[in-house]
Amino acid sequence: MAEKFADKEFIEFIVKSIVGNPDDVKVERTVDEMGVLLTLHINQADMGYVIGKQGNTARSMRTLLKIVGAKNNARVNLKIFEPEGSRPPRRSPDVDTDVVDDLKI
């Protein structure tokens, strides 16, 4: 039988409650000298719900996890797993501005 951890169950409950694909939610729990690290794996379509506007939802979940951890005398951190290539490529800083320069009077 799998061990039950309050921090892991807590974050699973929150995330499954806000995403559209709750069956895809998986949380990995690792412990080292820095504390507890919870790595959250979710469906790519639900990334916006979990991160929230300007990262507010993710920040709030991290704050609540720190409280749960403090209650259990542990330092708990949350990492949201983002697969390689999941973000659109950033615009290159060397954008061709010749067209804009032609418009200047």
Image (cartoon, helix red, strand yellow):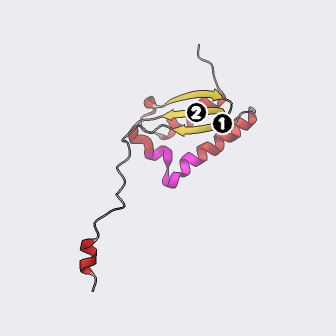
Residue 38's disc number: 2
Tell me: 47 left or right of 10. Answer: left
Badge 1 vs badge 2, beta-carbon distance below 8 Å? yes
Instruction: Indicate which disc, 1 or 2, sits on the residue closer to the N terminus.
Output: 2
In the rendered image, the vertical position of residue 56 relative to residue 20, given as above or below: below
Q: Where is residue 59 in the image (x, y as percent from the top left)?
A: 58, 48
Q: Main secondary structure of the magenta part?
A: helix
Label 2 secondary element: strand
* Residue 4 colored in magenta in the image: no
Tell me: 34 left or right of 99. Answer: right
Q: Position of residue 105 (x, y in %)?
A: 27, 86
Q: Position of residue 62 (x, y in %)?
A: 61, 43
Which residue: 25% across, 72% down? 98
In the rendered image, the vertical position of residue 55 relative to residue 64, given as above or below: below
Locate residue 66: give its quadrant. Answer: top right
Q: Who is closer to the viewer here, 33 or 22?
A: 33
Alpha-carbon span between mark 1 and mark 2:
7 Å
Tell me: 2 left or right of 67. Answer: left
Locate residue 96: give its quadrant. Answer: bottom left
Count residues near mark 1 (Cα–Cα under 10 Å), then give few for <14, some for 14-19, many for 20+: many
- Tell me the amino acid under the disc marked 2: Leu
- Tell me the amino acid under the disc marked 1: Val
Q: Who is closer to the viewer here, 78 or 94?
A: 94
Query: Which range is magenta?
Result: 48-59
Label 1 secondary element: strand
Count residues near mark 2 (Cα–Cα under 10 Å), then give few for <14, some for 14-19, many for 20+: many
Look at the image and tell me in which quarter the N terminus lies.
Answer: top right
Locate residue 103: give its quadrant. Answer: bottom left
Q: Who is closer to the viewer here, 34 or 5?
A: 34
Please give the residue where the numbered disc 1 appears in the rendered image: 76
In the rendered image, the vertical position of residue 77 relative to residue 92, given as above or below: above
Which residue: 44% across, 39% down? 82
